[in-house]
Image: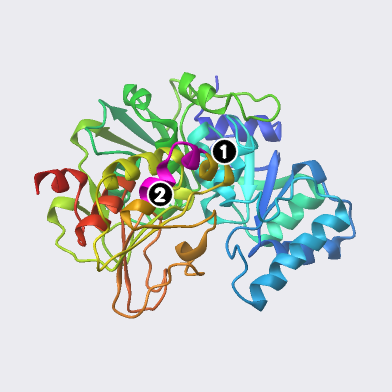
Amino acid sequence: MSRGKTIAEKILSAKSGVDAYAGQIVNAEVDYVMVNDVTGPIAFREFEELGMEPVRERMVLIPDHYVPNKDVASAEQAKEMREFARRWGIGNYFEVGRSGVCHQLMVDEGFAAPGRLIVGADSHTCTYGGLGAFSTGVGSTEAAAVFATGRLWFKVPESIRVVLSGGFRPGVGGKDLVIRIITDIGVDGATYKAFEFAGDGIAQVPVSDRLTIANMAIEAGGKAGIFPCDSLTEEYIADTVKGDYQSYEADDGAEYCLTLHYDLGEIEPMVAFPHLPENGRPVKDADVSIDQAWLGSCTNGRIEDLRIAAEVVKGRSVHPDVRFIVVPASPRVYRQAMQEGLLETFMESGAYVSGPTCGACLGGHMGILAAGERCIASTNRNFIGRMGHKDSEVYLAGPGVVAASAVAGRIVTPEDLEAV
């Protein structure tokens, strides 16, 4: 009698037609493959050499890293993607104006859904695990192979079970939890493993926070981060999801290489110090002045994040020594924030509001740091030189802390502002 399976094992079994368990190599059918303006051109060139017809309906092309183009080199990359889409008749190409941060657009446009197998030539493709998908980053050459065949090989990963109980305290959310997890196990603590979240506490974690947590699975080396599908998931995707989907739950007898337990009520507001996401500390232990606050990215650029931040800065002003940059992650998020008056709130506080782009998150543009400058950011990485000069510093935190810090001029929580 075979043992029970994890969610990762179930999805990869279903997509490969093999009774698969951790450690096995499978050749699986991919639901969608996504590339962006940085990783796409390499994939296009590799694909062209194969001399095959593309699996058009499964391909998603999203310019987002250098949008709008910042120089001739980025304009040439974008042009190559645009011309490839036209030449092969790729319907899922999102031109500037319809484009957004690729991982948010994959959710907004209904490509991501429970039980799907999705690969992307971007390391944070693991985001869609927040909806119950098995999604993971691949190289551009692997993406080219999927363009041609619709399939890719995978080594079925072991899974780390993360059991959640209780509920978050006010001012605490998914970003704080995932920084805590990465701090506990280290940036290589989950190398080629899937995080699988379980426990009664999941019902207290909003889907937007699940996407944040899954997004940063890669920051611990994870192959994927997967939440089970529940009523909150179904409600979140009801108006956007494309086609049918099949959700999966882990079996009682599934085997895990490690089990972690977290009482959400014990999680504090966290900040990850330079230069690794594992350098997490409670915000109360931080005494750091900042030059810039940056809210956005595939990690925390959703409408829920903007609402949290707008509530913090409402009626307040950004500190005179701080630049506060707000970047909604997609046109849908931007439009909703505009309709709700959030953009006006940000601008009245003295913030700069941008259209959707990855921009400064990867050290691209629209918020680059000079030598010696410090930024509190809702992004997912704070490596040396990640957001600009190698002698700059990036501190990672959730939207409330980013907004409160923009007002205070130093890293604080919204609760700290109330106490002033």
The residue positioned 64% from the left and 71% from the top of the image is 74
Q: Give x and y (percent) for residue 227.
A: 46, 32
131 sits to left or right of 314: right
Which contiguous range is marked in magenta?
336-346
The residue pinned by badge 2 equals: 190
Q: Is residue 206 left or right of residue 81?
A: left
Residue assigned mark 1: 134
Crowding near pointer 2: few (<14 within 10 Å), some, many (20+)?
A: many
Nearest the viewer among 114 and 168 is 168
Residue 76 vs 128, above or below: the answer is below
Image position of 62 with respect to 163: above or below: below
Q: Earlier in the sequence, mark 1 or mark 2?
A: 1
Q: In the image shown, does 328 or 62 lie closer to the viewer?
A: 328
Report the Cα–Cα distance between label 1 and label 2.
16 Å
In depth, the one of 266 and 18 nearer the eye is 266
User: Crowding near pointer 1: few (<14 within 10 Å), some, many (20+)?
Assistant: many
Q: Position of residue 251 (x, y in %)?
A: 48, 21
Give the residue type at disc 1.
Phe
Q: Is residue 87 magenta?
A: no
Residue 158 seen in render: no
- Please, what secondary structure does the residue beneath circle 1 have? strand
Residue 252 visible (yes or no): yes
Q: Amino acid at mark 2?
A: Ala
* Location of residue 79 by image quarter: bottom right
